[in-house]
Image (cartoon, rainbow, N blue to C red):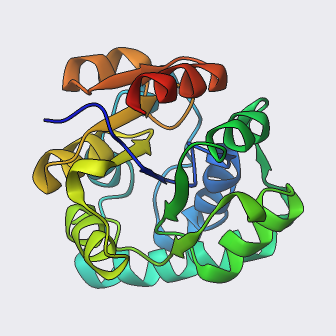
Amino acid sequence: MRMQGIKTIIFDLDGTIADSFQVGLDCANALAEKYRYERIEDSPVIRDLSFKEFLVSHLNLGKIRLVLWAREIKRLLSQKADDVRVFPGIKEALTELKKHFELGILTSNSTKNTLKILKNNEIEDCFSFLYTNSPAFGKWASIKKLIKKERLKKDEVIYVGDEIRDIDACNYAKIPIIVVTWGANSARTLKEEGANFYAYKPDDLVEIGKKLI
């Protein structure tokens, strides 16, 4: 897999750029009584689970109820979008990367929430394209569709994410990935899954970027 000549970096939003994990937990806990599951606390156990494992172990909802739950989560997240801040150092890293790469976003978050988060944190000008409302599963298909629609060359693209499912999606889509360790999944779990690059702080994204030009 090619690791130089990269021209486009596609970013996940939540957990990668936006520090929204606790906001997401607050929204999930607001629905705990209605959907009859135990309130969820942030813990190393949670951080070691894939998203699918989390849904099974902590929610255990049927398909229809899960769809309804997901819709309500998006509604609650929309109400709290103004509370979401980007991780310290991310704005500076994005500004530097934009000098050398085209930057874009692929996220399962809504268009409204995404635009609000970017604008509130003054980073909306860093991105050339936004793809929102991506399915929670099967992100690889969204990546392939994005590459085709934007007329990108697959060997000139790299993805940046924070979860096990991001690694899986990039493996299926056959593009390299930079995994950040400050998001939803723990560094230990991400290392076990395997990725092309690891960023332990936002400055690392810039250093990795220098190797990809």
Which picture quadrant has residue 168? top left
Residue shown at 69% from the left, 34% from the top: 93
Vertical arrangement, residue 15 with respect to residue 69, above or below: above
Q: Please state if 176 lies on the left or on the right of 111 as rendered.
A: left
> Looking at the image, which residue is at 21% across and 26% down?
193
Residue 157, compared with residue 42, is above or below; it is below
- Residue in the foreground of this view, choosing between 211 and 72: 211
Q: Is residue 138 above or below residue 5?
A: below
Q: Quadrant of the C terminus?
A: top left
- In this picture, residue 196 sits left or right of residue 202: left
Q: x and y percent of residue 190 in the render?
A: 32, 25
Left or right: 154 as drawn, with respect to 174: right
The foreground one among 21 and 13 is 13
- Residue depicted at 42% across the width and 22% down the height: 211
Seen in the picture, residue 211 relative to 157 is either above or below; the reply is above
Q: Is residue 32 left or right of residue 146?
A: right
Count of marks, rendered view: 0
Residue 87: x percent and y percent?
A: 73, 36
User: Would you identify the image quadrant in which residue 191 lies?
Assistant: top left
Q: Residue, x 32% and y 47% (percent of image)? A: 166
Say which quadrant the N terminus sits in.
top left
Relative image position of residue 155 (x, y in whole percent): 21, 49
